[in-house]
Image (spheres, helix red, strand yellow):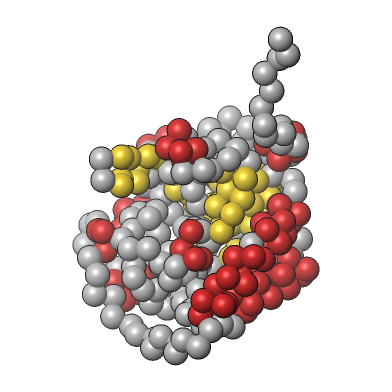
Amino acid sequence: MGSSRSSEPPPLVSEQEPPTFERTFPAFTHFVEIAPGFWHCRAPFVLKKGPLSDDIKTHMSVCRLSSGKFVCIDAVKLAQEAKAELDQLTDNGNELEAVFHTHPFHSVAIASFHVCYPSSSTRKWFGCPRHLAMFTVDEGKNPITWSGDLRCCEVRKMYEPDVAMQIPAGSEFVDPKPPTSNHFSTVFVLHRSSKTLHVDDCIMYFDKPSALMRLFGKKCHSMEFHNSICGPGLYPTEQAPMDFKNWLSKLLDEWEIDHIVAAHMGNCYNNGNDKLRKCLDDAEATFIKIAKRNAGKEPAEATEGYTDDPNAVECG
C-alpha cells in the first residue's frame, strides 16, 4: 500500500518564516521584528457567525524612520507584556512620532491606545474619515486630536520616502456601505527600508487556517482578496474591477515588497511581491465576471453618514 500524500504541495520554506538577522530586541515575543526596522504585533479578535466563532486575529505594526523615530500603523488592545515591549522600543512613547489608523472598521483599540499614547503636539494621530467623525474621545474621556485625514494625498505623503501609502482605486474608502460587509478598501502602507507591506482586510493570507476557515475552503499559505470584492467591495460599475486591477499592478511594479503583514490570519515572508502578483493574476476571471455583472448599472451615489452602530461593524 502506498504512503498517503497531501494533495497540497508544501510551501516554500522562505514563505513561512521571516528572514534571519540580528534583531534589536531578540527577547520580544509580542512585537516581532519582521525585517530590520519593522515590528509586528498580532492580537486576538474573535469573529462570531451565529453559533460559530473563530479567532481571526488582528494586528498593528511599528516602523522606524530614517530619523530614528517611530510610527505606529493601526493599533490593538495591548496586553501588559505587549505594552512593556512597545514602551521599551519607543522610550516609553517619547520616540513615537505618529499613529496611523488605516482601515475604516479597524477601530476597536483606538480609545484604549490613545490613553497609552495620546495625540499631542509631538505625536500626531491620523485616521480614516470615519475615525475622525466617530472617535473623538478615548476611554479616559480625553479628547482625541486628529492631525489629518488619510483620504488626503498630502497626508499620505507626509513620511515619504520612508513610508509610502496608497488607497486602492475602484473602491469606496470614505464611507463604505454596508458597513457590516464592505471592508475592502484600506490604506496600503509600505515601509521602504524593510520592504514590508502592512495591509488590512483587502488582502487575506492564510498561513495556518483554522478548522473553521478550512471548512470554508481556505488553504494553507494561500492569498486572496477579501470576499467583499464579489459584493459591495468595488464600485458597482463595469470599470471598477479594471481600475483596481490596474492600480494594484502598477503598485507592484513600483513598490519593492518582500514581506506582507495582513490583518487577519497570517503573514507572507520573503516573496510578497510574487505572491500578491499571483493573487492578482488568479483573480482575472473574477474581475471579468464582476465587470460583466455591473455592465449597464448606474453608479451608486456616494453618501457620508456613519449612522451604523460601531459595535456591530468593527473587524479589528
Residue at the (25%, 40%) spot, across then down: 51
**Of the pair 129 and 229, the residue shown nearer to us:** 229
Residue at the (49%, 48%) spot, across then down: 264
Q: How many marks?
A: 0
Q: Give the quarter of the image for residue 207.
A: top right
Location of residue 226 in the rendering, given as x and y in whole percent from the top left corner: 51, 58
Residue 188 seen in render: yes
Left or right of 49, for residue 3: right
Does 207 appear above or below 251? above
**Of the pair 300 and 62, the residue shown nearer to us:** 300
**Of the pair 256 and 37, the residue shown nearer to us:** 256
Location of residue 45 in the rendering, given as x and y in whole percent from the top left corner: 38, 44
Farthest residue, direction front = 1
Left or right of 71, for residue 146: left
Location of residue 19 in the rendering, given as x and y in whole percent from the top left corner: 74, 39
Location of residue 251 in the rendering, given as x and y in whole percent from the top left corner: 70, 70
**Of the pair 95 and 316, the residue shown nearer to us:** 316
Does 112 appear above or below 231? above
Image quarter hosting the N terminus = top right
Residue at the (24%, 75%) spot, across then down: 307
Residue at the (49%, 66%) spot, across then down: 230
Residue 158 seen in render: no
